[in-house]
Image (spheres, rainbow, N blue to C red):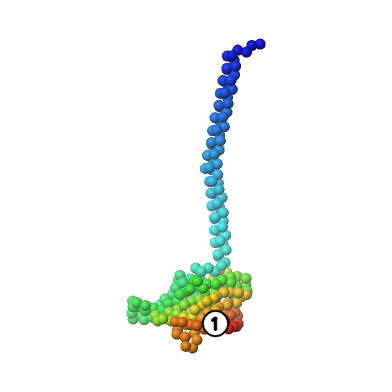
Amino acid sequence: MKISFKYIFIFFFFTLLLSIIITWNYSKYSKKEQILGWVEKPKIESQNSNYFIEKKFQEKKENSIDKLTIEKLSNLEYYVNAFNKKVKLINGFYKEVISPFDPGLSGNYAYVMLLKEYVRFGDLNQDKKEDAIVILTSNFVGTGEFKELAVVINNNGEGSNLDTIFLGDRVAINFLEIKDNKIIIEMLTHNIYDPYCCPSKKLKVIYKLVGNKLEKVSSPPLE
């Protein structure tokens, strides 16, 4: 039986045509898949990323409700020994005019400022909540810088200044921490012949909150 060249040609022609059609459809589908892979997939990842970011932010917000923060401490009422009264800080600062007869006079006011670099957190009253200690500095126009240590108790996320103790004029605080429900502070105070600008006496004091008052536990010497 002889097969004509004509039928062989037709067979190869349609086989080639079928191969071209299959290849074209496959490449079209792969291209679409690539487009979807590059466009739609990041969209899904972006949605997931936003979800986790929002969830993390919400958790952080909820946790901060019951915690004291520097912002909360900077807008709190404190008893200040240098002023002999309570003052309300706004953004870590309070000031009042000394002379009502000339309120516009440059530098004619006293102020209290919270030193944010000395803010420390830790449990002071053994209720397993983070309380805080802050250093306040006061000035009355002159060169004096009267530093005080203030204790703030955490009442469900709201701060309450229980006690404030006077540390001294222009003392230099070298170390401050809360450890084992106690406050440890190391500073330079003044010897008898030290000028106020330059304290040289090393002092370490440990305080503990007893009731609503700070009591000195010990004052070990520093070399």
Q: Which part of the image, by quadrant, shows the N terminus?
A: top right
Task: Give the farthest residue toward the bottom.
Answer: 192
Which residue appears farthest toward the front when viewing the image?
Answer: 223
Residue at point 57% right, 66% down?
A: 66
| Position in image of residue 54 (x %, y %) | 54, 55
Residue with the most extreme top position: 1
Q: Which of 38 and 65 is in front in this view?
A: 38
The residue that appears at 58% across and 26% down in the rendered structure is 19
Amino acid found under the numbered disc labelled 1: Leu
| 24 relative to 160, above or below | above
Q: Which of 36 and 124 is in front in this view?
A: 36
Q: What element carries label 1?
A: strand
> Left of 186 or right of it: where is 102?
left
Q: Name the residue under label 1.
A: 203
Residue 78 on image: x %, y % = 49, 76
Q: Where is residue 99 in the image (x, y as percent from the top left)?
A: 36, 81
Q: Is residue 83 left or right of residue 206?
A: left
Q: Residue at x 37, y 79 (%)?
A: 108
* Picture quadrant where residue 113 is located: bottom left
- Please indicate, yes or no, whether residue 63 appears anywhere in the rendered image: yes
Q: How many marks?
A: 1
Q: Residue furthest right?
A: 1
| x, y percent for residue 216 | 58, 83
Quick check: 90 above or below 14? below
